[in-house]
Amino acid sequence: MPSPPHRLFSLLLVLGLGACDGQSPDFSRPEPGEALSAGSATVRRSDRDAFAQPSANLTPVQRLEFAVGNSFFRKPWVTAPASTTARDGLGPLFNTNACQNCHLRDGRGHPPEARADNAVSLLVRLSLPETPATAPLAERLGVVPEPLYGTQLQSMAVLGVVPEARVRLSYDSHRLRFSDGFEVALRRPRLQLDHLSYGPLHPDTRFSLRVAPPMIGLGLLEAIPEAAILAGADPDDTNGDGISGRPNRVRDLARQNTALGRFGWKAGQPNLNQQNADAFFNDLGLSSSLLPGRSCTPIQADCLAGADGGVPEVSDHLLARVLFYTRHLGVPTRRAVDDPQVLAGKALFHRAGCAQCHTPAFVTAANAAEPELANQTIRPYSDLLLHDMGDGLADNRTEFKANGREWRTPPLWGIGLTQKVAGHIRLLHDGRARSLLEALLWHAGEAQAARDRVLTFDAGQRAALLAFLNSL
């Protein structure tokens, strides 16, 4: 039940978060333009297709270009040779045959159900610990590949090729208690692999489970000035607040240099074009000029010998259409920004310290890649930096500069529409959390103090915090 308005007003007074002293932020009313999470690009939809809309500031001609990119994102690719030459070359090893299968209606993926035939929208990344001998490889790829299976398990294959493995999950559970006695059950996934077709995995293999993240607002995140992101970094915690925040430095394949990482659960990709090319290559087994060849290891002879769909299979023209599409998927408008309970939850979000990593707002660069992305005040609730999230969320797998306990702060915009868009709530990098509250309670490491403050919240405060998060 929502807390009564007098309780929410009292809560604001108790927190001392009013504007009366002229110093603290005023959480008694919305900020100007707060409902427009993506500035003039904000989409005024909150239904099941809210994540699949073009940015609101596109012209009619640009909307046609968006639709072309959408067709390549949604429709299945087929094996080669085929009469559909623009979409052939799938595999030979792959995880899915269409981008939309992982990003459900451009939203969030999910772990496999207990008896699912394949994992589809959950990926299993692989690597070995770095050694002095493999350091140059790790610098170039970000990780050291597992010798037989590479950097990602593919659980599907074209006819005549054997899939690499079957992925199953089970869960271990424990409970966490709030100060008022309210308990929440948390579950940790346990990876189970069988039918390893190319031999046993190296005994030192590190595994990382990754569900597909939402696609909204990616072009706007790409348009945030690098200096604005780096201004939030404090790798040595010089201010002593317990929050560091480190940029990942990754390989830019097109420019052949090192760049700021922005995309992926560990900020392992520098820009959207490379993120898209990597997904085509590893998830669908499709080559591009940026990532040519095959996603096969040297021992996978049947994979190496399979038919291709041309060189490259994803042309530069097609890749550019998908880039335009992924840059311009709009962010839905906020809901109920002036609701007293939502405003109280916003105050609690800041009071707990959540905004120290989930940075509310940025202004995009004037020289953004597309004019429609430029000079926009956006509210992604992310600093795009790496943070130590503790042992509970650790995958113990490095990726460029990210260590095994670090994750990029995921944007929170649109999170309240997860159920409506994707038909489920499976949060965090591996989809273990079945609710916003579960996701919050897994926070540790740099977020331990914030999590502990939330554990002191009573039922009314918990409801207010969740109302705020669901409004995003």
Image (cartoon, rainbow, N blue to C red):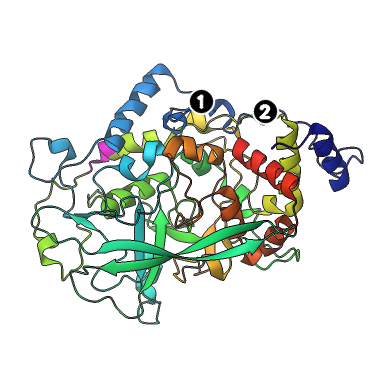
Name the amino acid, label 1: Arg
From the viewer's perspective, tell me whether residue 51 is left or right of residue 35: left
* Residue linked to disc 2: 33
In what element is the residue under mark 1? loop
User: Which residue carries the number 1 mark?
Assistant: 45
Residue at screen point 59% across, 29% down: 39
Q: Nearer the viewer, mark 1 or mark 2?
A: 1
Q: Position of residue 396 (x, y in %)?
A: 47, 72
- Residue at horizontal 31%, vertical 54%? 119
Which secondary structure type mostly characterizes the magenta part of the structure?
helix
Whether 268 is drawn above or below 55: the answer is below
Instruction: Identify the residue at horizontal 46%, vertical 51% (top origin).
Output: 263
Magenta residues (range): 314-318
Between 151 and 450, the one lying in front of the other is 450
Q: Is residue 320 above or below residue 118?
A: above
Q: Position of residue 401 (x, y in %)?
A: 49, 66
Q: Earlier in the sequence, mark 1 or mark 2?
A: 2
Residue 414, image quadrant: top right
Q: Quadrant of the N terminus?
A: top right
* Residue 129 appears anywhere in the view: yes
Residue lying at 80% horizontally and 38% vertically, measured from the top left: 8
| Residue farthest to the right, as pictured | 21
Query: Marks 1 and 2, Cα distance to the nearest angstrom?
Result: 17 Å
Circle 2 sits in a helix, a strand or a loop, which is it? loop
**What amino acid type should be assigned to the residue bearing mark 2?**
Gly
- Return the x and y of residue 179 as percentages of the image width and height: 74, 60
Report the number of discs.
2
Foreground residue, 355 or 287?
355
64 sits left or right of 364 in the view: left
Q: Is residue 53 above or below residue 395?
A: above
